Image (tube, helix red, strand yellow):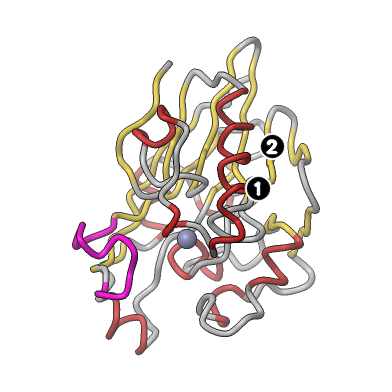
């Protein structure tokens, strides 16, 4: 079974002064596609550029999700599912471009997304008929599971892909960089709040303990390779 993972560069934002990573200046935004016999599974949909406040604060440059999929030879009508690692605006911004596709999200994240200033509510809103709410770890298709990895947000999840004896993980933003994954560390400022630091470190440790052969990150082009 071909369960290969491919990366889509979905755009970038300029980081405003209040952002914990402001010193980096810019933040690239990646989504992923898992090949699957049931149809491609998209992990995160990037950012959009039709929101005044986001445009003012973050000056996003975006690649349309459909263009990114087509560039990989994928017909968007074949997409079987979307997984949102979390509901920050730069991870769910183009969910609406695939309006009929089921979206997998953690229950804790749906709850968190209701708090003020968490995200762009219009982008994070998932219509009831396509919302697939998960509480914890679950297999969503043969060989493809989500693992609850709270820390960066209360309902963050990562994606674990298994085929034969190899395991690859889409870390998402459980940690920010490949270097952090290797070291098993996170930047406290990247956590939702200080109370989730221990939880975030434990989430990262769960992923590391899978001993994946590859790991992919939302905001770092570097790919972890064992
Ligand atoms: Zn985030």
The image quadrant of residue 131 is: bottom right
Foreground residue, 61 or 37? 61
Report which residue position mark 1 lands on: 80
Dot 1: element: loop
Quarter holding the N terminus is: top right
Q: Is residue 3 above or below residue 176?
A: above
Distance CA(mark 2)–CA(mark 1):
7 Å
Foreground residue, 193 or 67? 193
Lateral position of residue 129 relative to residue 222, left or right: right
What number is the disc on residue 195?
A: none
The image quadrant of residue 216 is: top left
Quarter holding the C terminus is: top left
Residue at position x 69%, y 58% from top? 105
Residue at position x 72%, y 72% from top? 111
Q: Are marks 2 and 1 in contact (CB under 8 Å)?
A: yes
Q: Is residue 94 above or below residue 168?
A: below
Residue at position x 58%, y 59% from top? 86
Q: Position of residue 223 (x, y in %)?
A: 36, 30
Task: Determine crowd level at label 1: few under 14, some 14-19, many 20+ residues with C-alpha closer than 10 A.
Answer: some
The image shows a total of numbered marks equal to: 2
Residue at position x 54%, y 76% from top? 118
Q: Is residue 79 above or below residue 49?
A: above
Foreground residue, 72 or 115? 115
Which region shows up in magenta? 16-27
Report which residue position mark 2 lands on: 38
Mark 2 near ligand 1 (CB under 8 Å)?
no
Q: Position of residue 156 (x, y in %)?
A: 61, 54
The earlier-in-sequence mark between 2 and 1 is: 2
The image quadrant of residue 55 is: bottom left
Dot 2: element: loop
Q: Is residue 106 above or below residue 220?
A: below
Q: Position of residue 200 (x, y in %)?
A: 58, 47
């Amino acid at each position: 079974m071909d369960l290969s993972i491919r990366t889509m560069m979905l755009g970038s934002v300029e980081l405003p002064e209040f952002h914990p990573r402001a010193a980096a200046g810019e933040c690239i935004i990646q989504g992923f596609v898992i090949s699957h016999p049931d149809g491609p599974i998209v992990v995160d949909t990037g950012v959009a550029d039709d929101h005044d406040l986001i445009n003012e604060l973050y000056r996003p440059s975006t690649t349309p999700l459909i263009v990114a999929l087509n560039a990989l030879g994928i017909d968007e009508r074949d997409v079987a599912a979307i997984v949102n690692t979390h509901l920050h605006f730069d991870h769910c911004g183009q969910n609406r471009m695939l309006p009929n596709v089921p979206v997998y999200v953690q229950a804790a994240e749906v709850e968190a997304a209701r708090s003020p200033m968490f995200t762009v509510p219009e982008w994070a809103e998932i219509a009831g008929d396509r919302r697939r709410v998960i509480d914890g770890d679950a297999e969503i298709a043969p060989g493809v599971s989500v693992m609850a990895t709270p820390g960066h947000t209360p309902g963050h999840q990562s994606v674990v892909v298994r085929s034969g004896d190899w395991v690859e993980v889409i870390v998402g933003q459980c940690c920010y960089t490949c270097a952090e994954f290797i070291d098993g560390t996170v930047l406290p400022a990247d956590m939702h709040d200080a109370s989730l630091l221990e939880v975030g470190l434990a989430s990262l440790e769960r992923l590391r303990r899978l001993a994946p052969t590859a790991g992919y990150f939302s905001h770092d082009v570097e790919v972890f390779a064992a």
